[in-house]
Each structure stands twice: as structure tokens, then as C-alpha cells.
Amino acid sequence: MIDLRSDTVTKPTSGMLEFISNAQVGDDVYGEDPTVNELQRRVAELFGMDRALFFPTGTMANQAAVKLHTQPGEQLICHEYSHVYNYEGGGVSFNSGVSCKLIGGDRGMITASEVEQAINPPDFYHSPLTSLVCVENTTNKGGGACYELDELQRIRDLCDRQGLRYHLDGARIMNALVAKNEDPTRYGRIFDTISVCFSKGLGAPLGTVLAGKQEVMEKAMRIRKVLGGGMRQIGYMAAAGLYALDHHIERLAEDHQRALEIALVLKGQSYVKEVEPTETNIVIFYLDDHIDETKFMKDLEQKNVKIGSMGQGKLRMVTHLDYSQDMHETLLELLGDYGA
Ligand SMILES: *Cc1c(COP(=O)(O)O)cnc(C)c1O
């Protein structure tokens, strides 16, 4: 099966499994798991942040960040495609009692001037108080698009002027760092908190680390506990994260190259209406009007290829660690032959 629904479908490699089985562990609720401590230290250091905390999922890390930065009744600003708004079960209202002010914009990205217009004037007490801006890099529903650092910095400057906090949903930040050849410490200087997923392109079974400034992260342990995220000998999973940091980052460039090649082949097909720009490992495309989406996906599945649908005609393929060169060549051929 060639499974391109998501980069979360990967299974640990034998090297990762071996590293996991050799991990030193302890009870992390007592802060005594050396492997968890090591992963947290490594991620904090990578981004030049003060502290970091290991979470079971990216959703929980984002939810903790929103809770850290807001009070009930307040409002956060994010893109209408964003994961915190669309794919976390309404958690920002459930867990933090906040609402979202949504911005539309190019492939899941927002600009400083759009954010500026979305801020409610603090003295206008009829509106919710704006307290947080969340951005995604790379964007998920936006098709793996990468921000320009300058734009992220302009939003930071605006947050400073307006007294807002600033969170990066960096589920795929490693993809952005590799694609743009950027220095992660620049991100550490721009954001108050950054979440980094290990279960996406990095190929670990689970785990997200939230990195942040000291004064913010002090409360993060309590919030993680309240959300049910205190774990015991979780060093086995932190080991997967450490292994991924050492072995699975540079290879993301291969995923990006393959995604680009898929996009190029799709562009040449009469059954494809449009392919969005492909910057990292996500390819988003739309079928021509006379092609039935359900049938298309079924036809592919019959040839052992699974892809994802994001609604409104948006189809998605995501390349990853378990998508090999052999599979890639098979897929390109299949896409070229489809409908012929
Ligand atoms: C996957 C993802 C998350 C976290 O998802 P979990 O399944 O909870 O780990 C957060 N943000 C974005 C943009 C994602 O793609």
C-alpha cells in the first residue's frame, strides 16, 4: 500500500526501535526520566528557548499554549485554515474559554497588516479582548506553505506594540527549517512558545515538545497535568524523538523533492484542474470539474494508493519517511496513466 494520506502514518524504523529499547527511563511525573529531560533540553537548545516540555500530542501542546497565553472570554487571532481552529475539537473554547478571530489569506498564512486589522481595540469593552496570535509553519490545510521570517518578525513587532502573546504551531517546523535553510534560534527569538511534532515527518510514534520562555513555561507543567498529559516512563517515546532529531531531519529534503515531482506530474494531467504551489511535503490539488472525486479516490485505492480529501474539492498527498523511491516511481507512472 502506498499511503499518502498523511505523514503521520509512518512506523518506527528498526534503528529507531533499537534506540527506543535501549533508552534509560524513569517516572517523568517526578521529573526523573533522563531521556525525556534530554529531549526537552535538546529542543529548547535547538530553538534557543529557556525550557521545553514533552506532550503526548500536538493538539495537547497547542491547547496548553493557548491556555498559557489567554484568559476565558479573550480572543485569539489565527488563519481560518488553522489546526487550532479546525482540528482540535473546539478545544480552545472547551479548555480555555476563548474565541477565534479568523483571517483568510494565502495558503494558510497571515500577514502583520491582516493581524493588525483583526485586533479588537482594548478599550472597546463590547468586544472580546485580543490576547494571542497563532500561526502555523508549515501550514497544514494551506498545503505545506512556509512563511517568510520577515513577516513572522513583523507580526512579533506588532504583538510587542499591542501586548499580545505569539504562538507557533510548529507541527511541521522542521520541514520549514529544511526547505528554507533557516536558523531555528531565529524562531526562538520571535515566538513566546513553539510546538514541534515528532509524529509527523520525523517518524516517531508520538510526541510533541512545547518550547518557550521561562516565565511562560513555569505554568506549563500544571496545565499539562490538568489536561491529563502527565506521563510516566515516557522516555521510550522521547527516545524516538531524540533518534528522529539525529537521523530524520536532513532527509526531509527527499520528501520535499518527491512532493515537487508529484506536483509536476499532476500539473501535466488533463484530469487535474489546479495544483497549489508545493514548497515542502504536502501536495494539494483539485480535479477537473467532470471528474468525480469519490471515484478518483476509489480508483487509486484499487491500485493500492491512498490519498486524503480535505473537503471543498481539495485533495492532499503527503510524502514521508515510509514513502520510498520505488513507491514514488510507481505512483508517478500511475498518475501519468490515469484516465488515459
Ligand atoms: C498534526 C498537527 C498538529 C497536532 O496534531 P496531533 O495529531 O494532535 O499530534 C497540530 N498542528 C498542525 C498544523 C498539525 O498538522
Image (tube, helix red, strand yellow):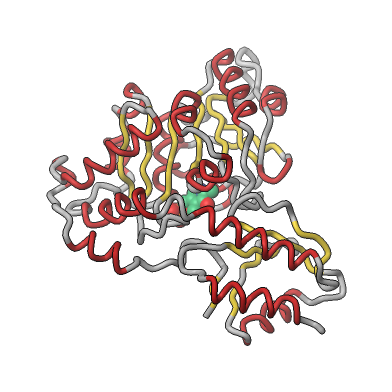
Q: Nearer the viewer, residue 200 or 85?
A: 200
18 to 48, vertically: above or below: below
159 to 273, vertically: above or below: above
Q: Position of residue 280 (x, y in %)?
A: 60, 51
Instruction: Name the side, left or right, on which 98 lies relative to 331.
Output: left
Q: Nearer the viewer, residue 141 or 258?
A: 258
Q: Quadrant of residue 23?
A: bottom left
Residue at point 82%, 84% (across, down): 340
Q: Position of residue 16 (x, y in %)?
A: 30, 62
Q: Nearer the viewer, residue 300 or 17?
A: 17
Q: Nearer the viewer, residue 181 or 29?
A: 181
Q: Position of residue 45 (x, y in %)?
A: 33, 32
Residue at point 63%, 60% (across, down): 259
Q: Quadrant of residue 185?
A: top left
Q: Quadrant of residue 39?
A: top left
Q: Position of residue 277 (x, y in %)?
A: 72, 51
